[in-house]
Image (cartoon, coloured by chain):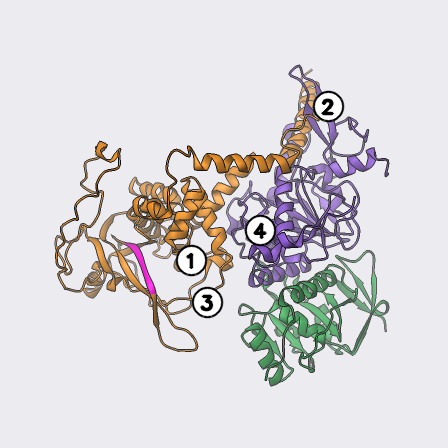
Chain colours: A purple, B green, C orange
Amino acid sequence: MDAVRPDPARSAAAGGYNFAYLDEATKRMIRRALLKALAIPGHQVPFGAREMPLPYGWGTGGIQVTASVIGPTDVLKVIDQGADDTTNAVSIRRFFARVAGVATTESTRAATIIQTRHRIPETPLSEGQILVFQVPMPEPLFKLEPRVRESTRLHALADYGLMQVKLYEDIVRYGEVATSYNHPVMVAGRYLMSPSPIPAFDNPKLHMNPAILLFGAGREKRIYAVPPYTPVRSLDFEDHPFRPIRAPHACALCGSTESYLDEVIVDDRGGRMHVCSDTDYCRERREGRR
Amino acid sequence: MIGPGFADPVLGAQAAFRALLEATAYPGRVRRIAPQPGWPAALPPAMAALALTLCDQDTPLWQDAGPEVARWLAFHTGAPPARAEEAAFLLCIGAPPPLAALRLGSDEAPQDGATLLLAVASLQEGQGRLTLEGPGIAGAARLEVGGLPPRLLAERAALAPLFPRGLDLVLCAGESIVALPRSIRITEAP
Amino acid sequence: MYVAVKGGERAIAHAHAWLAEIRRGDPAAPEVTLAQLMEQLGLAVDRVMAEGACADRELAALALKQARGDTTEAAFLLRAYRNTLPRFGAAEPVDTAAMRIERRISATFKDLPGGQVLGPTFDYTHRLLDFSLADPGPPPPPAPEAEPEGDATPRVTDVLAEEGLMAREPPGNEEPPDLTREGLRLPAGRALRLQALARGDEGFLVALGYSTQRGYGNAHPFVGEIRVGEVAVEYIPPELGFAIDIGDLLLTECQMVNQFAGSASAPPQFTRGYGLVPGRNERKAMAMALVDRALRAEELGEEKTAPAQDAEFVLYHCDNVESTGFVEHLKLPHYVDFQSELEKLRSLRARWGQEGQ
């Protein structure tokens, strides 16, 4: 699918805002944070997040990261729940078409920047592509230690015993780790990191990914990153290895038995169908392009 | 008379930042930043571009390129001049100050470690005496640097046990840059 | 396909058209003007201005109109707008001792220089619905005016400080931190805490202040003084090097006087809880002063036991643009995560069934 280029008369300058909305001082501050985040993989860098024209919790961190990175020759894809056509994805894509005048696409391959909420695309990413995650809660320890001062100290000491104990207690109680999404990961053997609430199914895609993975949490005012080709290990135990799960079905539209599926209720008698959550991947398969 | 900054401050900074973002993400790879006329001749153009891109009132700045450069930087960035030990950014065309004396951040805020932009004679990726390993590198990468200060790699290696504290290097040769973030290991063939 | 919220562009456009229609309401009713909002719903406008952290009543009124009267949504609109404005510099500290007083009361002294000025307050009104306001009528007759007493109106806390009974605040000549640019860093100094509280949610602060009165925190507050009025705002342009008057700002200031038992380094004396809010908003200024004092527990060496004394808890939860965004984001689609929960729950139930047999 080709990129869609917006009408320049309706974009950036016409709206009276700076290119990509943010003022240059804010971009500089975010850019400095992004560079330090890449230099210290998995470490949360505090930054002076601004109020954006979208609510906190709706992707303001991702939007600020994208706005600081994006240039006029970029091609942007925005997904929410893996899909290009969910309302929040549509809203964010329209925002950037309007304030940056950039081309947009639904194709994972054609995009240079992909902003995402809750998923990593099924189509493997390649070098130079940038995946921007919207992060609601960057602190992997927050349910175990809500005090920011204390969790900051634990990261400084690389003391992640709390999380190990929690996962172990799951196993004792349930026979398996009860985390199905937002399963914590160790980045480059040093920092415990929240992968943002992606399903555990997507966690292995973080490991040694050739693309640049940037994470923005606007409300919590943190930026972090996983550079390309960086080891990312989902926390587990030798006798209970990490096990990504997907619904044991095939996509009702494209037949994939490998993609992550949405479960759709089709009637009130327990009827269900399963379809790919990644709409671009599903369409490519149906169009016979893979 | 102070020379110009970016002809287009918005898009000029974006392009330069993107080059450094990619260089930092893929350590050892050479990225280029287009030079613009009128920048101080004392600075490699890539270093001048990165200073315009990253420095402002919030970034104490140290440089050793002389008063003309100082005036140019003050006018275009507003970055407060600082001693080397306090600087967030250091623009270095001569022998660099001892790395251990620079800002290295703390265990809780390692991001406060400095960024040292260092002028070198040449950069060539894919071959050479330096072998780079770590995040951003699939396996190992080779790099040749012309005019690397002799003590630099040893001083840098001495900081490695402090990780995540540390500082990040950007080598600038003319229009070319290579980033050497603190997270990677560098070994030098004899 | 049976997938609701997908199929976005058209749905969004139609929803916003509907919003515009319902915002205007029945066209038979006259459209409300910004002047009407500023003049007749001024306290709502002031609240938006304070929580929106942008001292511009006209923009606050516009935000309130656009938000259909939802003050939290309006504050959010104003915040998002203020972020796009260039910064010229920082004004000089305003001097509330030189305020042109419209209201000034003290609960600690019956009379004092400058006098008690009741001003346009709801206090002592009987809360009986006034049905005469139901229909437009002639404007009320002008309120009687008195000549100002002419005295200066010194702050009560300064009077107490003269006698050494009130702890003096440090001069604070260093550049204050800027919450809007650097975000919150802990431990937060008082200047940063006060910034957060000044734009914090009124309801949250009132509830926290109330909790300190009910024993959650060791508070013994007296209203030393509440004053409302205009102060001059001055700015020193670098090219001039001297202060120029760039306008007036209407403020509400509350100084709470609190007991302090003293310590090894300080004699027993009063300590201050401070509240300052743009516009007329006495309730918030008072609540802010209570919470400010509670948050000083640590520096004053008091036992820290109550929610209102926990700076991290208070400061991370007082901002309603942050809190409402995150609470409301739960209505966004979460089907990917929910799907993984479904599969996990099915797996756990299957295991439970096997082990139960």
Residue behind mark 4? A154
Q: Quadrant of the C terminus of chain A?
A: top right
Query: Where A101 falls versus C67 (above or below)?
Result: below
**Is residue C250 highlighted in magenta?**
yes
Residue C200 visible to an observer of this rendering = no
Residue type (three-letter) at the residue carrying disc 1: Leu
User: Which of label 1 and label 4 is nearer to you?
Assistant: 1
Query: Where C126 falls versus B31 (above or below)?
Result: above
Q: Identify the subunit bearing mark 3.
A: C
Residue type (three-letter) at the residue carrying disc 2: Met
Q: Position of residue B100 (x, y in %)?
A: 64, 72
| 3D distance between C-alphas at marks 4 and 2 | 44 Å
The segment highlighted magenta reads C247-253
Residue neighbourhood size for the residue with mark 1, other residues' Cα within 10 Å, grouped as few (<14), some (14–19), many (≥20): many
Q: Identify the subunit bearing mark 4.
A: A
Mark 2 lies on a secondary structure that is strand
- Same chain for the residues at labels 1 and 4, yes or no? no
Q: Position of residue C353 (x, y in %)?
A: 68, 18
Q: Are marks 4 and 2 in contact (CB under 8 Å)?
A: no
| 3D distance between C-alphas at marks 2 and 1 | 53 Å
**Is residue C105 highlighted in magenta?**
no
User: Which of label 2 and label 1 is nearer to you?
Assistant: 2
The answer to whether residue C215 is left or right of residue B74 is left
User: Which of label 3 and label 4 is nearer to you?
Assistant: 3
- Closer to the chain start, of discs 4 and 2, is 4
Residue behind mark 3? C88
Q: Nearer the viewer, residue A11 or C327?
A: A11
| 3D distance between C-alphas at marks 3 and 4 | 40 Å
Residue behind mark 1? C192
User: Which of label 4 and label 2 is nearer to you?
Assistant: 2
